Amino acid sequence: MVESVPMVTICCAQDSRGTAAMYKLDLPADPKGAAAIERRRNMEQQRQSRIFNAKVRTIGVDVPMLERQMEERKAMERLERARDQAFDADRQRCDKIAMMLEQRESQIARDLDKAVLKFREQHQQPGTRREYDLYDPDALKKERPARVGDHDPRCGPASLQKLAGEDLSEKERRKLQTELSRKWLSEQKEERKRSEVQKKYADELYDKKRVELDERALHLTKMEEECLKAVNMAVTNINQALAMESSERRKLEKQQEEENNFAEIYNHLTGDMLTENPAMATSCYGPHRVVPDRWKGMSPEQLKSILEIQEQQQQEKQRLKEEKKQEEVEWDRQRMLAARAAMTLEQQEEELNREIRKRVDQYNQQLSREQRAHLEYLEKVVYTNNPTAHYHSQFNTTSR
């Protein structure tokens, strides 16, 4: 590190007596040099903070490993993307199947509700029940009133039907109530009719749609059946043509076979096989070979030569047995000699190994003595001056 050195200017002047006098002028240092020194000092401190801090220090990066990791990451992302797409396609297919099943289930539920309502309307009317009179809403309307009129003979003094303060406008009031009830009933009937009309219209639309789907299904089924009929007809025609071709071919083959059989019978009748011609047994490969299916047996000369050859073969076989037996005896003798030589070599090898181990032990003992002497020399002579803290403090003081 470069330190700033103050600049000292020495001036020489001449007095009245002619002698030179020297004056020391303490001038300020150059600001540019001081700024450069300060800048280098700050850069050194920053460099030390970067190098000596293990968390910030970066010596190098394994670029191929990072690129391989990026490729593996991209491949994994592509695999995950393909897997997600497959799962999405499977989920969409399952959703479509679930929607179709749900629509079918709702259709079945609607059909079942319609059938139940129709059955109830036809066979389960409230008036047909045995205990309907217990909860009939019109039971009081159907019963005879307790008082028909003022002169009803049932209304005696104890009936409490004729009391003071009786409502004399009962008939008008009842008439108004009846009209109001009739009006309400008519409004309810109209509301019910409207709802029934709307329901009927919806059912008609649903029935038309179902009929349309049924007609379309029938049309598709009919087209499919026609296609199948055409295919079956074409297959039938092809099969018939193949059958006719096969029958013609069989006829030709049968006719050819009959002609071949007649020719073979004629050749057998007129050939040398049935006439037992001895020359027919001679093979075309040489006079010493015969044709097996034409051969009529061997001559006495041939039988005699075969017996002589067999006798020669027996003698040769006996000679080979004797030679093999002698060869085995010689091999046994050689094996015994080799075993004896191997035992002798093994004993010599054991003696040599013992001598080598003895020399190795002596050499190891010598090395052990030399090592102990070397360690004593290091401990007593070389390693006598142990480093102090001042020795270690001179390291890592600069970044260079």
Image: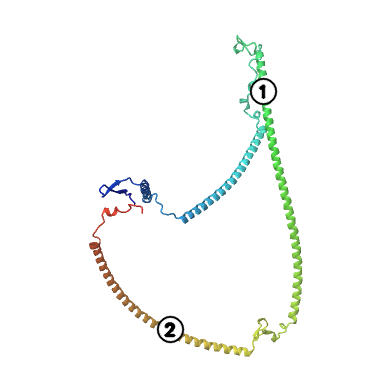
Please tell me whether mark 2 sits on a helix, a strand or a loop: helix
**Residue with the mark numbered 1:** 185
Q: Where is residue 238 in the image (x, y as percent from the top left)?
A: 74, 59
- Left or right, 300 with reference to 258: left
Determine crowd level at label 2: few under 14, some 14-19, many 20+ residues with C-alpha closer than 10 A.
few
Colouring mode (rainbow / by chain / secondary structure / one colour)? rainbow
Q: Earlier in the sequence, mark 1 or mark 2?
A: 1
**In the foreground, 85 or 297:** 85
Please tell me whether mark 1 sits on a helix, a strand or a loop: helix
Identify the residue shown where x is 50% and y is 86%. Answer: 320
**Which residue lies most toward the top here?**
164
- Left or right, 366 with reference to 181: left
Q: Where is residue 189 in the image (x, y as percent from the top left)?
A: 68, 25
Amino acid type assigned to the residue bearing label 1 in the image: Leu
Amino acid type assigned to the residue bearing label 2 in the image: Trp
**Quadrant location of the C terminus?**
bottom left
- In the displayed structure, 329 sits above or below 115; it is below
**In the foreground, 390 or 11:** 11
- Left or right, 398 with reference to 307: left
Identify the residue shown where x is 68% and y is 31%. Answer: 198
**Which residue lies most toward the front here?**
17
